[in-house]
Every structure is written in structure tokens, then in C-alpha cells.
Amino acid sequence: GLIGEQERAIREGRFGQVRANDMAFHAHIVARAGNPVLERSWSELVAQIAALLYLRAEAIPDYDETQAIREHRAILAAL
């Protein structure tokens, strides 16, 4: 699944793919919700979120990429 792919990308140092998987995880949840308002909101924010992930990676070179994995698991557990 997406979380496993994200973990693999972290281990392999493919951080562009890590961020792509991060975005795909959230897009998947939005799509599965089937809520047109949520889908519209996501589509309006997705570019800004992607930019923030990129900026965070540049500003904090030692950022713990596994933090997103823990957060994604918590999201899935809550669903």
C-alpha cells in the first residue's frame, strides 16, 4: 500500500517519492470519502500543501520523514 511504498522510499532516500506518496495518501482518503465539498477543498489546497512539504524538506534537512508514517497510521486507525 501507500504507507509501505512511502517507507521503502524513505529507506532508499527517494524523498521526492516520499512526498508524492504522502500526497497520494491524503488524496486517496479524500476520494474515498465521496464528499464533493471535501474534494473541491482538496483540489484548491493540494498545490499549496505540496509546496509546504517541499519547503519543509529544504528548511529542515534532518526532518524525520517517518513522522508522516506515524501520522498516516494514526489517521487510518481513527477511520
Image: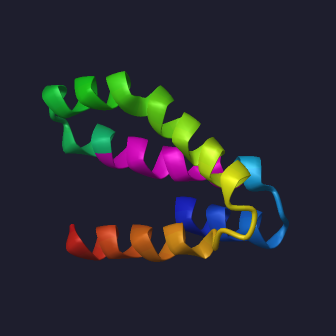
Of 11 and 67, the residue lying toward us: 67
Quadrant where the image shows the N terminus: bottom right
Seen at 73% across and 67% down, the residue is 10
Quadrant where the image shows the C terminus: bottom left
Q: Quadrant of residue 64?
A: bottom right
**Does residue 62 belong to the magenta stretch?**
no
Relative height, residue 23 to residue 73 (above, below)? above
Color style of the picture: rainbow
> Percent x, y for residue 42?
32, 32
> Percent x, y for residue 38?
20, 34
- Magenta-highlighted stretch: main secondary structure? helix
> Percent x, y for residue 49?
46, 38
**Does residue 24 belong to the magenta stretch?**
yes
Residue 1: in sight, yes or no? no
Residue 45: in sight, yes or no? yes
Q: Is residue 50 left or right of residue 42?
A: right
Question: Magenta region: which residues?
Answer: 18-29
Relative height, residue 15 to residue 12 (above, below)? above
Seen at 46% across and 77% down, the residue is 70
> Percent x, y for residue 60?
68, 61
Of 57 and 74, the residue lying toward us: 57
Seen at 54% across and 37% down, the residue is 50
Q: Is residue 32 left or right of residue 49?
A: left
Seen at 51% across and 45% down, the residue is 23
The number of numbered discs placed on residues in the rendered structure image is: 0
Furthest-front residue in view?
59
Relative height, residue 20 to residue 4 (above, below)? above
